[in-house]
Amino acid sequence: MGRYNLLDEKWIAVICQDGGQTELVSLKELFANAQRYYDLAGEMKTQDFAVMRVLLAVLHTIFSRFDAEGEPYDLLEIDEERFRQEEPVNEENLKEYEDVLFDTWMDLWEEGKFPEVVQEYLERWRDHFYLFDDRYPFYQVTAAEMNELAAGGGQFFGKNLNRTVSESNNKVALFSPIGDIKKGKDKLSYDQLARWIITFQGYTGTGDKVFVGSSKMQWSKGWLYDLGGIYLRGKNLFETLLLNCKLSVANDKADEEIQYIQTVQIPSWERSPIENVDVYFKNQVNNLATLYSSWSRAVSFDQNFQEGEAFSCHIAKLPEINHVNNFLEPMTCWIRANTGPNKGNNLPKKHRPEEAMWRNFSILMGLEKEGEKSHRPGILQWYSRISESLREIARYKITICGVSMRDDGNAMSWSPTDEIVDTINLETAVAVDVGDDGWLVRINHLVNETRHKINRTLGIFLHRVSMIRGFDAKDSRLENRGREELYQRIDVAFRDWIGKIRASDSMDEKSNEWYRVLEKALMTYATEIFESATVRDFKGISEDDKELNIATAYNAFRNQIYKEFHREG
């Protein structure tokens, strides 16, 4: 008999719009009242991202089969017992199917809440949403199946599963938010366990040793682990979920997109545990519902576990999902590999902790940088399409959110160490202005020029200061540190500037506005260094029979500033 059913138990953390308090809700409550919640509110944003994708898997499954009124599409055969789609849509009906999917999305947006068919679908699959069950445990295999697959698997503890701790058996997490008295780090409530098992399947690492099948496989570290996660945030949770529900195609001329919607949406709970394991050996991650509810490990819980006890489970590695040109994934940045076995192909691009997302604007928006053009994230392509059909969205201030899991850099473990979270606010009309003379191209040019101007002014100045202070000409530590400090100083100003751009603004005037901010920041930074210079800095050195000291370096910097910002050509 199953225990702790996710349809009824309160395990999803949300922020309520009325009062702003955080509370736990069930899966059914969330879909019934999504318009009343502001956002997800789990322990980490990476956790929220993982949980959101499970919610999206529900939506993609249902609305690939039913319209906004809860009626099945005439083009499909739907079984009445489980609401399963019996067969893929016929190729000759694909264009019509694409159109009705888009109409469904538009109708849902207009309605502002999810229809009753969501509740009906979840009830049809109630027996697959038990966290503890002897047949269909959620996101798990049974103990008997684990014995058959991987001789019982490797032991894994609560402190490994809980990513706010992420402690291994070999290394203690010194700054854990949870004490370890009486194995406190291993203790998890049922609601925590539900959230963390979903997160773990997305952000896993490779430090565990036991695997399913042949040792020659490329093992998954968790699909989400390698993503530079991108999603859109709306005014409430309903809007956020729907904005990220890429129900139809963003580009009807892209053959792979047509293929993606033709494939039947099958989330993990519509398969048996063993069928879910087989998916990764048979390369069957070919639809968004499967991708959004994907596994990296076969996991087996102790079905007698009780809250208040130290938690442990058993796990075994599953094969990695293909990363190369896998544009089924719409919620990531991409980068073209210039070296290695994947040279010339696109791979997911993780966010970097030391760089704000706007500094990689070309990658975020799929624009050209130094001759290379990235693939634009599918969710941003999708937003461009829906904005063409919804006039009110043109005035909408959209928030583009970025999320990645930081790792320890150790290829033997890829242990999670921190998360990377960022946002950019843009007026919709600006965010979708992708033409050659549009706002995105102009902003991208300014971001690239900002980098070049910093390098040609502050970068050269700091390089000279470093040499004056006796460092080797190849030592770039002072230069690199100064550039990063300058970027930190201008970060808030850039976010404020880009967020206030209106599509009707003059591009030249807005560009000059930003350059004035940048020039002032550069002058202030260099002047502070000059004014705090030591006697040694003024004494300087002789280089190529010329005197180089802080005064000559500062004067050269000021001349370069004039050339960059005031001299035409």
Image (cartoon, rainbow, N blue to C red):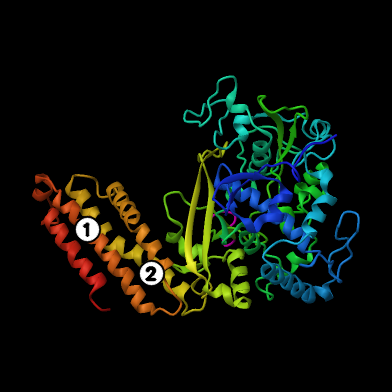
Amino acid under disc 2: Leu
Magenta region, main secondary structure: loop
On whether residue 495 falls in the magenta region, the answer is no
Q: Position of residue 328 (x, y in %)?
A: 68, 61
Left or right position of 228 against 94: left
Image position of 194 with respect to 518: above or below = above
Q: Earlier in the sequence, mark 1 or mark 2?
A: 2
Quadrant of the image for the C terminus? Answer: bottom left
The residue located at (63%, 77%) in the rendering is 389
Amino acid under disc 1: Thr
Furthest toward the front, the residue is: 19
Packing grade of label 2 (10 A; few <14, some 14-19, many >=20) is some
Q: In this view of the protein, which residue sits in the foreground, 59 or 516?
A: 59
Residue at disc 1, secondary structure: helix
Residue at disc 2, secondary structure: helix
Q: Which residues are magenta?
A: 338-345
Q: Badge 2 is on which residue? A: 446
The residue located at (53%, 70%) in the rendering is 396
Residue 324 appears in the figure: no
Q: Position of residue 334 (x, y in %)?
A: 56, 60
The residue located at (83%, 33%) in the rendering is 148
